[in-house]
Image (cartoon, helix red, strand yellow):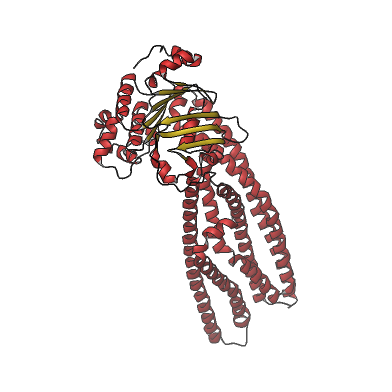
């Protein structure tokens, strides 16, 4: 957490220093008040040498001083609270923005290590915990020690015996708090980790609610949710039990010390060793210590949660993208657009190879089909073209340059990809399409929709392209989502177009029209599909199986040379060439 403070509190140095000084000023007023009360009792009320008029005058003066202290203390604490709120909110906003920015710099390899549910909690819950610590630091880091230390010093000045009791009580309380703090931190971290699991289950069930209902798994999912909630509840109950134990324990120790102080002071008062004003001052100082310790206790509990949250946030910052982009901003005018040269790829060091010694090339303007069973490595292959991951061995080149040597923007401009899962955002259809090209005009949007076979259904929607896409595109069918995703890729106008099983929800007639429109485009096209009919008329077909390139050629060539391809076609009632 200290690292986060150093990084994000720099611009709020004035707030931290000035806010803390204001709290010190407030503490000073609180420490002086008991002395004024002691003077009023011993030197005014109990002073028989003064006339009633003088006593009243002095009481009014002392009352005015106390009132002035109260007003100044109120102003100080109000300003300090405001400054603390501004600093903590600003710190939290800066941290959350920077953390979100950092997450977006990570490659898929790093993002695979932490679930999206956990990242959401670290962006929200963990950031709030650390943010709350900032506010409490400004409010208490100087004020509480000053109150405790100042009250002890003043109590020694008033009565050294009472001062010793104050000192012993304070040391005992802080030792107790210190040991419990180190006990709470790992439990807090465990609580946040379990919260990640609950958030993940909630996210899955809310986004996949239709699937849950379709398979009548509401009871199962409810049980899974409740089981994890119960587990979370046990951890949080353990934390709450500790917190609940702390307060009574602290008050017990303080009240016991209060009884001892009153007993000792009472004996001294009977023996005329201390005055009534001294007793009143001691009671006030002890009350201030009591309130300060309770505030420190609250701060320590919050600090332990913040420390655990800070560790979780730093775990994200510890991840750095394994992908470093080059500086090439232009492409060569070559016929060979894509080349895989003995490429092997693993998602992590301990995993089996998703791709094994893959070698092939694609010429400019070629339409290539990639087919294979589930887990054959089709999507892994296009992930390497986009450089979502880096190869484990070998080389992938675009237009004669290794993909590692291109700048991020240039590589993004070269390739437009329609992902296997159509993802649309909760905004208008127009804004979803414009994610492919920010400055696209209405004519370009309409042309992209027409090419993607989406214009007919979009024009019939309420408000047309301004129609609002609901969360997770629940108001659109699977085929409609796929066509809009294709339109978003087409408007990007990249020379390479990759379609990753992006027509699986389309009927054959719509798919045929889409393929006809794509053929008109002057692009190098890679189509990945489970359906042989989707790639049958491609210039070449690449057949993958278990991460290996089994065969490559036209439909007719593969029918005659590849048993696996014949089996795929036979399973789909596709033998002779169909277009």
Foreground of the two, 324 or 16:
324
Q: Position of residue 221 (x, y in %)?
A: 52, 28
Q: Position of residue 226 (x, y in %)?
A: 55, 33
Q: From what the image shows, is residue 216 above or below residue 255?
A: above
Locate the C terminus and report the quarter of the image it occupies.
top left
Q: In the rendered image, is residue 194 in sight? A: yes
Foreground of the two, 481 or 368:
368
Residue at the farthest front position: 334
The image quarter containing residue 271 is: bottom right
The image quarter containing residue 269 is: bottom right
Foreground of the two, 46 or 261:
261
Foreground of the two, 91 or 35:
91
Q: Position of residue 368 (x, y in %)?
A: 41, 26
How many marks are shown on the rendered structure? 0
Which residue is rendered at x = 58% and y = 30% of the image?
A: 353
In the image: residue 516, left or right of residue 69: left
Q: From what the image shows, is residue 277 above or below residue 444?
A: below
Q: Position of residue 470 (x, y in %)?
A: 35, 36
The image quarter containing residue 293 is: bottom right
In the image: residue 460, left or right of residue 538: left
In the image: residue 153, left or right of residue 415: right
Q: In the rendered image, is residue 420 in sight? A: no
Which residue is rendered at x = 54% and y = 70% of the image?
A: 21
Locate the N terminus and report the quarter of the image it occupies.
bottom right
């Amino acid at each position: 957490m200290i690292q986060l403070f150093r990084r994000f509190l720099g611009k709020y140095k004035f707030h931290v220093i000035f806010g803390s000084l204001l709290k010190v000023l407030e503490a000073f007023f609180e420490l002086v008040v008991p002395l004024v009360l002691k003077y009023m009792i011993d030197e005014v009320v109990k002073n028989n040498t003064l006339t009633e008029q003088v006593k009243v005058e002095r009481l009014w003066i002392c009352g005015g001083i106390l009132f002035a202290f109260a007003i100044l203390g109120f102003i100080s604490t109000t300003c300090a609270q405001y400054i603390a709120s501004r600093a903590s909110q600003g710190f939290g906003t800066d941290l959350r923005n920077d953390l979100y920015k950092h997450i977006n710099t990570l490659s898929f390899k790093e993002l695979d290590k932490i679930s999206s549910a956990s990242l959401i909690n670290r962006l929200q819950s963990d950031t709030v915990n650390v943010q709350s610590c900032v506010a409490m630091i400004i409010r208490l880091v100087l004020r509480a020690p000053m109150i405790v230390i100042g009250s002890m010093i003043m109590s020694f000045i008033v009565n050294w015996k009472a001062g010793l009791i104050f000192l012993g009580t304070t040391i005992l309380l802080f030792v107790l708090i210190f040991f419990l703090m180190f006990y709470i931190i790992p439990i807090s971290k465990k609580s946040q980790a379990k919260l990640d699991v609950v958030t993940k289950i909630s996210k899955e069930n809310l986004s996949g609610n239709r699937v849950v209902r379709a398979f009548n798994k509401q009871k199962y999912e409810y049980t899974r949710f409740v089981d994890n909630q119960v587990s979370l509840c046990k951890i949080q109950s353990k934390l709450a039990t500790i917190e609940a134990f702390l307060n009574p324990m602290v008050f017990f120790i303080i009240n016991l010390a209060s009884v001892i102080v009153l007993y000792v002071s009472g004996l001294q008062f009977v023996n005329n060793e201390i005055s009534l004003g001294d007793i009143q001052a001691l009671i006030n100082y002890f009350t201030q210590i009591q309130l300060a310790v309770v505030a420190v206790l609250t701060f320590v509990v919050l600090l332990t949660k913040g420390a655990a949250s800070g560790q979780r946030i730093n775990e994200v910052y510890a991840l750095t993208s394994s992908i470093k982009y080059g500086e090439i901003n232009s492409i060569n005018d070559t016929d060979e657009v894509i080349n895989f040269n003995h490429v092997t790829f693993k998602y992590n060091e301990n995993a089996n190879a998703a791709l094994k010694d893959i070698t092939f090339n694609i010429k400019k303007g070629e339409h290539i089909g990639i087919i294979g069973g589930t887990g054959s490595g089709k999507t892994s292959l296009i992930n390497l073209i986009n450089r979502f991951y880096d190869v484990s061995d070998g080389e992938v080149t675009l237009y004669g340059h290794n993909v590692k040597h291109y700048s991020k923007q240039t590589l993004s401009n070269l390739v437009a990809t329609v992902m296997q899962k159509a993802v649309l955002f909760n905004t208008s259809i127009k804004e979803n399409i414009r994610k492919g090209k920010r400055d696209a005009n209405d004519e370009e949007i309409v042309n992209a929709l027409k090419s993607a076979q989406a214009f007919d259904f979009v024009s019939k929607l309420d408000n047309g392209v301004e129609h609002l896409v609901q969360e997770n595109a629940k108001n659109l069918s699977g085929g409609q989502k796929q066509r809009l995703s294709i339109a978003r890729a087409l408007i990007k106008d990249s020379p390479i177009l990759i379609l990753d099983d992006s027509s699986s929800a389309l009927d054959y007639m719509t798919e045929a029209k889409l393929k006809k429109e794509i053929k008109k485009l002057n692009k190098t096209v890679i189509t990945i599909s489970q359906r042989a009919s989707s790639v049958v008329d491609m210039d070449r077909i690449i057949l993958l199986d278990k991460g290996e390139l089994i065969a490559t050629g036209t439909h007719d060539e593969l029918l005659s040379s590849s048993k696996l391809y014949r089996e795929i076609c036979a399973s789909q009632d596709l033998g002779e060439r169909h277009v």
